[in-house]
Amino acid sequence: MKYFYVFALCLVFGLKPDLVQAQKASWIWYPGDFDIWMSNKMQNRRTERGSFLPPFWKMDSHYVLVDFHKEFDLDKAEEVKLYVEGQYNVKIDGQALTGYPKTISIPAGHHKLSLKVYAQDRVPSILVKGTKVVSDDTWLATFEDKEWIDASGKVSDKSGTIFVSAGSWNMTDPLMPPSKFQLPVVPAFAVNKTKQDKGLISDFGKETFGFIKLHGLKGKGKLNIYYGESKEEALSKDHCETLDLLELDISGVKDSVMALSKAFRYVNCQPEGNVSLDSVSMLYEYAPVTEKGSFACSDPQINKIYDVAKYTFHLNTREFFIDGIKRDRWVWSGDAYQSYLMNYYSFFDSPTVKRTLLAQRGKDPVTAHINTIMDYSFYWFLGINDYYQFTGDKKFIVDVYPRMKALMDYVLGRRNKDGLLEWMPGDWIFIDWADGLSKDGAVSFEQLLFCRSLESMALCADMAGDKDGAANYGQLATELKAKIFKLYWNENKHALVHSRIDGKATDNVTRYANMFGIFFNYFNPAQKLEVKQHVLLNDKVNKITTPYMRFYELEALCAMGEQDYVLKEMKDYWGGMLNLGATSFWEEYNPAKKGTEHLAMYARPFGKSLCHAWGASPIYLLGKYYLGVKPLSPGYETYEIEPALGGLQWMEGKVPVPGGEIAVYCSKKEIKVKSASGKGLLKFKSNSKPSVKGGVIVAKGNGSYELSVEKGKDYTVKYSI
Amino acid sequence: MKYFYVFALCLVFGLKPDLVQAQKASWIWYPGDFDIWMSNKMQNRRTERGSFLPPFWKMDSHYVLVDFHKEFDLDKAEEVKLYVEGQYNVKIDGQALTGYPKTISIPAGHHKLSLKVYAQDRVPSILVKGTKVVSDDTWLATFEDKEWIDASGKVSDKSGTIFVSAGSWNMTDPLMPPSKFQLPVVPAFAVNKTKQDKGLISDFGKETFGFIKLHGLKGKGKLNIYYGESKEEALSKDHCETLDLLELDISGVKDSVMALSKAFRYVNCQPEGNVSLDSVSMLYEYAPVTEKGSFACSDPQINKIYDVAKYTFHLNTREFFIDGIKRDRWVWSGDAYQSYLMNYYSFFDSPTVKRTLLAQRGKDPVTAHINTIMDYSFYWFLGINDYYQFTGDKKFIVDVYPRMKALMDYVLGRRNKDGLLEWMPGDWIFIDWADGLSKDGAVSFEQLLFCRSLESMALCADMAGDKDGAANYGQLATELKAKIFKLYWNENKHALVHSRIDGKATDNVTRYANMFGIFFNYFNPAQKLEVKQHVLLNDKVNKITTPYMRFYELEALCAMGEQDYVLKEMKDYWGGMLNLGATSFWEEYNPAKKGTEHLAMYARPFGKSLCHAWGASPIYLLGKYYLGVKPLSPGYETYEIEPALGGLQWMEGKVPVPGGEIAVYCSKKEIKVKSASGKGLLKFKSNSKPSVKGGVIVAKGNGSYELSVEKGKDYTVKYSI
C-alpha cells in the first residue's frame, strides 16, 4: 500500500518510482572474497575428538586491498554515510578527503565516488548509504587499479586496470558487517533427560545442530561433554566423534554457551571434581532460507521420507552447502552439486549456490582439483551449468567465466597421451565410497564428467563472449564423446566398461558411467535400453550403498520412466533408514548391516555421518520426476510438467521457479497445474479423452497429450490412467 | 670460552659439539609469507595530509592454512614446548593430540612431528623448542598437503604434495611472534624549540624517523601537528605532506605517543581551544643492522658525503628496503635494487635483501609488473643475480627460482612481434623522473634490462637444476643481445639510440641504455670509448637530475676508470646538497634550482622526499670503485681489490664479505689489505718497483702489478703513483 501511494505520487509528478524510492544499500566486496573468507572460517571449525581438523587442500585468501567506485548523476547534493571494514580512503572525483570520514557530502551533478580499503583479517567491504548514492553490485571493484603518477606529476588513469562488478549478498545492516556475519539461532530444549554416573544425558528428540548451553554450572573441576548423533555415540567416551573437555573453576552459579557449534541428538555431560550443572539446552542454528518447494502424496511413508529429507537438507544448508553437520562440515564439490539440485526443488536459494561455487573455486593459480578430487572439479562445472538452467542468471555466468577457464586450463593440462584423464600425483579419484572400486587407469566415469564439463564450458564461453573458446570447447567435447564410445562401449556387455588400463579397456562393468550416460543423454535409445537391462536392473553389477550414488542411479531410472520401480526403491532404502529410527538421512546405508554396524565408517565405530546432505535426494527426485517439473530453457522461460505417480494414488506439490512457483496436483483422474511465470508444457498420458477448461489439449498419439500452460492461469485436466 | 669448555668436554666424551649444544629454535612460516604480510602492513602505513594512501598494485596474502613437519631421531625422550600463531593441531607420527597442547613429550626413536596451523589475520607460524626438536628452516612446509582418506578409511600420504623449506628470520623469542614484529625504538630529543602562534616548533637537528611523543598534554580542543623535512614544510599548514589532526579532551595531564611513525626534522604543534602541551620528543625507530662497511679519506667533504649517505641509507633500511621515509615508504623494486648494492658495502644484511625480494614478488598469478613498472620487474631479476654474486647463497636461489620463472613467463608473454618489449595496458615504463623522456615504442633501456634478466634466469635455472630452462633462457638472451645491437646501435651517433617506434629506430640518444651497456659489459672496448665520449661526457645529451640514475651514470664512468672525474661529480652533486643544508640525501637534486624550488616535486611544494635511499649511492661507489673491492666469484670466494684514489691523498675502509670483512688502506705510497676470507687479487699500478712482505707481486706490464691475497694475512705494499 505504501509503495502504491508513492507510485501514485510519482504519476502525479511524472517521476519514475525508482528515482523517488531510496535504494537499498548493501555491503559490497571484491566478488568471491567474502565467500572465500567465510568458507575458510567455516571449514576450519572441524574438530575430531577435540583436535582441530582442517581441510587438506589449499585455502585461499581475499584480496587485502580493494578499490571500489561508481559514478553518479545527482539532481541535488546529498549526504552519504560510509561504513567500512578496514582502513580506507575516500575520493570524490579523484580528490582524497582527509582522514576516515563517516559522513560525506556529494554535490549535485556528475561525480565519481571511490573508496579504497585495506584489511588483512577481514574482507575489505563497504556500505555506502545516501539517497541515490548507495552501494550495491552495480559498483565496480578492482584489486589493482593502475592509476599512476606520470613524470609531470599528473595523476591519470590508464587502461589495463580490470574492474569487475562488486560482490554482494544483500547484507544491508550497517552494524552487521560481513566480518560479523552469522546464522541466526533460536533456543531449543531437550525432550528427555536421564542421569548416568555423575552426569546427565539430554536427548533433543532428533538430529539437530547448534551451540550447547549449560545451565546452573558451578564448582571446580572438569566437565566432559560427549556428543552423539546416536545414543551409543554419546555414551562412548572413547569413540564419540566430537567432544568438549572443559576445565572449570566457577564461583557462584553461571550459564555458559559453548563457542563451537556441534551436531547431535544426544549430549552426555560428565562432571568431575565438585562440578555440577542443572540442565542442558541449545541454541539451534539455522540458515534463514524459505521453504518454497513442497510435496505431499497418498503414501504416508513417502511423505515422511520427504519431510526428513527436507530437514536433513536444511540442516546441511548453512553458510554454504556442506556435506554433513557432525564431522567435516566442509564444502565438498560433489556433495554440494547434489545440494544445488535439491535446492532448486526446495529453497531455490541462489545466493547459497553462488557462495558455494565461489568458495570451492577459490583463487588462481589452480594447483589442484577442487577438494583435490578429479570428479569434484567436474561437478563444479556441471553445477554452474545447472545453475544457469534453473535460474537463467546470465550475469553470474559471465562473472564466473574467467574462473571456469582457469580451472579448465588446469584440467586440460593433465590429459594423458590419449587425451584422457587418469590419476596423477596429487589427484584423488573418488567416484564413490565402495569396497574394491578400481581407480586405476582412465576411468570411463571421469571421462563422461570431463565431456559434460567441456560442453558446459562451450555454453558459458558463448555467453561470456569468448567465441573462440566456445568453438574450441565444443570441438573438444565432440571429440571426447566420440572417443568415449569408441574406447569404452562394449557390445557384448551392452555397457560402458569401467576403465582403460595401459591403453586397453577392461571388461569390468560398474554402474557409474552407465547411469550418467543416461541422464546426460549420451546413449542412443537402444543403448539406453541395453544399459537399463544389463546394468541398472542387473543385480550382478555391484550395488551402490551410498545415497550419494543412489541419487544418480535412481535419476537414471526415472529418466527412463521407471518411477514405479524407483518409488519402491525409495521406500525400501530411505524407508529402511526411517525404520531404524533415523531422524535425518545418512552418509551411507547398507541394508545388509545390523545394529551398531550402521553407525561405523572409516574404521571408526561412530565415523559415519547420520545427517548428510546427499541423503536428501528424494526432494529432487520427487520434484523433478514425480511432480515432473523441469526447465526446458534457462530460468524456466519454458518448462515441462510431466507428472508421474509411480504407483501413488495422488500427489501435490510446488516447485519454485524464478518469480514464483509451479503448483501441481495429480491423481489418477485429475491434473491441476498453475505457474507463476514462463511458458509451460504439461505432458501426460490418458486412457480416455482428456478435457480442460481454458486451454487446448493436443493429442500426440499413443495416448499421449500435451497442454500449453500460460502463467497465472489455473488448469484442471480431467483424464484417466 | 664457554664454547671452548663445551667443546673440550665433547672431546672427552667423544661427542660432536652440535649434538650437545641446544639448537636455536626460530619462528618459522611458509617461505615468503611473513615477508608478504609484513610488507602489506608496512606499505599500508602511507598517509598524505591525513588521508590513507595505499599502493596501487595488487597486494597478496599469506597462505592461511599451512602444515609444518620434520622427522627426528632422538636418543632419548624429550619435552618440547610449542608456540603457535593461529589455530592448530599437533600430530606425532600422524596421530593427532587432543586440543591445543603447549607442551608435548616425544619418545626416543625416529618420529615425525607435524603442526597444522590456520590463521587469517596473521601468518601461520610456529616456534618449537625442545633439545633436539627445534623449529628452523630445515623443517618442511606445505599449503596443501594431500594426505587423504582412501575407501578403506586408512589415512595415507600420496606423492603430489609439494613441500618446501620453511621460512625463518631468526626470530627466537617465543613471546615475540611474527605478528608482533616491530623495529626497536630509542627516545630522542629536539635540539631547538621555538614558540610560534599558540604553538611550538621543535627542531630535531637533522632528518629523522619515528613516533612523536607529546609531553604534558592537557585541555579540550584540537591539536594539529604538521611535520616537515624542511622548516618551510612544517610551517606550511596547507601543504606539508604529513600531519596529524587530533581531537582532545583530557582531564589532568598526560603524555601521548602517536600511533603512526613519521619522517621529519621539524614538528610544528598548533593547539586550538584550551589545549596545551609542554614539549615534544620522539621515539627514534631504526633497523638493528650492523654497520660493517666503512670509508674515510683525506677529503673531509667526501667523508661527510659518505656519513650522510650512510645515515640516509640506514633511515631507509627498515622492515624492508624502502624508497624514502617521508612519503611512500613502499617497497619499490628499482629503488630497492640500488639499496641491495649499497647494503653489500655497508650492512651486508642478507635477510633484509631476501625479505624485500620476496615481498616484491608476492604470490602467483603474476598479473602485472612489479610495482606495475616494466623496468622494476627486471631490477628484481638483477637483484637476485647480484645477491648470489655477493653472498654465494645458492639455497635462496633454488628456493626463489619458481617465483622467478613465473614472473619471466609473464614477461615473455608480453613481447611484441619483434620479440621486444614495449608498453602494454597496465604497464608503467618508468626509467627515470625526467622531463620529456619518451616512453613510446620499444625503448632500448628496457631491452637491455630484459636481456640481463634472461642471463640471470639462465644462471639461476642452472643452479635450480632446470637444465632445459637454463638452455632456453641462455639462447633467448644471446638472440636478444644481438638484436639490441642490430636494431639500436647507431654508427653515426656512436651510441645506442633511445627507442624504436613503429618498427623504426629513432635517432634520439639518451644516457640510460648507454651507461648500462658499459657496466653490463655489452659493448666492445671501442664502443665503450665511443659511448664515453659521445654520451657520458657529452653535455648535449640530456643531463640526469636524480641521484637514482646518477648512480648508474657514475658507475659507468668508474667502470671506465674515470674515478677522478666521478670524485669531482660527487663533490659537486652530493656536496651541492650538503651546501644547501641537507642532513640526508634527496630524491632529486637539480643544481639549477633555487631556494624552496628544491623542496617541490610532483607539482606539490613539499612533494619531494629529502631522505631517499637512492640518494645514498656514494656508499656503493666508494666501496666498489675507490676501495675497489668486488667479488669475482659468488660469495667472494675469489675477489678483486683495485684501489683508485681518484685524486684523494689517502683513503681507508672496510668492505663486508661473508664471514668477515676486507680492510683496505691506500695512499700514494702504500696499500694495505687484509681479508677475512676468500682468495683475493690486489691490482694496482706503480711508477716504481713495488715491494711487499709475505707475498709475491707479479708485474703485468705497463706499470701494472698484481698481488695474491690470502685470508687472514696482513699485506703492506710499498709503491708510488
Image: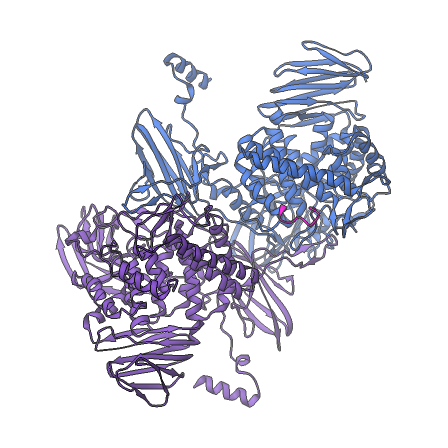
Chain colours: A blue, B purple
Where residue A464 sits, quadrant-wise, is top right
Whether residue B209 is visible here, answered yes or no, is no
Residue A413 forms part of the magenta stretch: yes
Give percent across and percent down for residue A361.
57, 44
Residue lying farthest to the front in this orientation: B492
Give percent across and percent down for residue A167.
48, 37
Magenta residues, start to end: A412-420
Vertically, is B306 above or below A556?
A: below
Vertically, is A514 above or below B42?
A: above
Give percent across and percent down for residue B20.
54, 81
* Horizontal side of residue A697 vs B592, given as left or right: right
Vertically, is A75 above or below B408?
A: above
Where residue A713 sits, quadrant-wise, is top right
In the depicted view, which residue is nearer to us: B333 or B572?
A: B572
Quadrant (top left/top right/bottom left/bottom right) for the C terminus of chain A: top right
Where residue A301 sits, quadrant-wise, is top right
* Horizontal side of residue B478 vs A503, given as left or right: left
Query: Dominant secondary structure of the magenta stretch?
Result: loop
Residue A176 forms part of the magenta stretch: no
In the depicted view, which residue is nearer to us: B298 or A76?
A: B298
Give percent across and percent down for residue B165.
54, 64
Vertically, is A305 above or below B166?
A: above
Looking at the rendered structure, the number of numbered marks drawn on it comes to 0
Residue lying farthest to the top in this orientation: A693
Whether residue B328 is visible here, answered yes or no, is yes
